[in-house]
Image: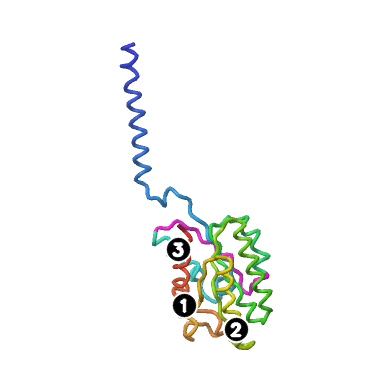
């Protein structure tokens, strides 16, 4: 028996050392390295789809850079399409949720509805349906507030802007109060059409979104 113990002790000691080293290595890894990155799905229109600017310079791409700079494991997927409406977004969202399985969904839609003077009730219903679909897929929701020019009257424009805060409150969703804050009042930050921000405006838009997105990634 004594001979058996002497022969197996080195093997047991080696196994113990290997286990301890593995444990120490795991403890030394940052928390972000042990967790899978959270997917953020952005469903928007031309304001998010880098319309008229170079690929990779839009605010969605800048959010990816911000997350990396702050060592937050996140993968931001831009599923935005220029010209999209809330009706289009509602139709596109279910397969996107199934494909990407996001932890967070950013809904940046409604501007084209407003510019076309579509009924507010239908726009609100579409956004509400998108929020419900995202929640059903166990994703958190970040709604981005949009404002439109008073082309269809001041009452329509003010009701349109107020719709986002109302929806966020009623559905308990996170909200960017106004996506184009500190941009909308500067003509030099827009392309000749006066609707789409230039590349130089994108960092400010990203800065408007990030403080509301970051808490959702914890």
User: Alpha-carbon neighbours of circle 1 within 10 Å: few (<14), some, or many (≥20)?
Assistant: many
Select label 1 or label 3 by which is in front.
3
* Depth order, front residue of 133/15: 133
One can see residue 50 in this view: no
Quadrant of res 12: top left
Identity of the residue drawn at 46% across and 66% down: 63
Where is residue 216? Give x, y as percent.
48, 61
Whether 198 is drawn above or below 55: the answer is below
Q: Is residue 72 left or right of residue 178?
A: left
Of the two numbered discs 1 and 3 on the same chain, state the one appearing first in sequence.
Answer: 1
Q: Position of residue 100 (x, y in %)?
A: 58, 56
Q: Relative to the observer, which residue lies in front, 176 or 189?
A: 176
Mark number, residue 201: 1
Q: Is residue 210 magenta?
A: no
- At numbered mark 2, what does the secondary structure look like: helix, strand or loop? helix
Q: In the image, which residues are magenta?
A: 71-87
The residue to which callout 3 is attached is 214
C-alpha gap between disc 1 and disc 2: 23 Å
Q: Residue at x 61, y 75 (%)?
A: 110
């Amino acid at each position: 028996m004594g001979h058996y113990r002497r022969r197996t002790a080195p093997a047991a000691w080696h196994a113990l050392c290997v286990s301890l080293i593995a444990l120490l290595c795991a403890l030394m890894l940052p928390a972000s390295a042990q967790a899978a990155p959270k997917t953020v799905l952005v469903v928007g229109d031309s304001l998010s789809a880098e319309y008229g600017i170079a690929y990779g310079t839009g605010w969605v791409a800048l959010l990816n850079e911000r997350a990396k700079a702050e060592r937050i494991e996140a993968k931001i997927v831009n599923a935005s399409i220029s010209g999209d409406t809330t009706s289009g977004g509602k139709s596109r969202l279910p397969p996107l949720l199934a494909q990407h399985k996001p932890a967070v969904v950013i809904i940046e839609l409604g501007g084209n509805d407003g510019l076309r003077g579509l009924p507010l009730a239908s726009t609100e219903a579409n956004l509400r349906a998108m929020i419900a679909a995202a929640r059903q897929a166990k994703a958190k929701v970040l709604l981005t507030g949009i404002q439109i020019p008073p082309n269809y009257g001041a009452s329509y424009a003010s009701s349109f802007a107020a719709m986002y805060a109302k929806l966020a409150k009623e559905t308990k969703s996170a909200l960017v109060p106004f996506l184009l804050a500190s941009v909308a009042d500067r003509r030099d930050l827009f392309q000749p059409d006066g609707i789409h921000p230039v590349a130089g405006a994108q960092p400010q838009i990203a800065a408007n979104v990030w403080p509301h997105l970051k808490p959702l990634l914890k």
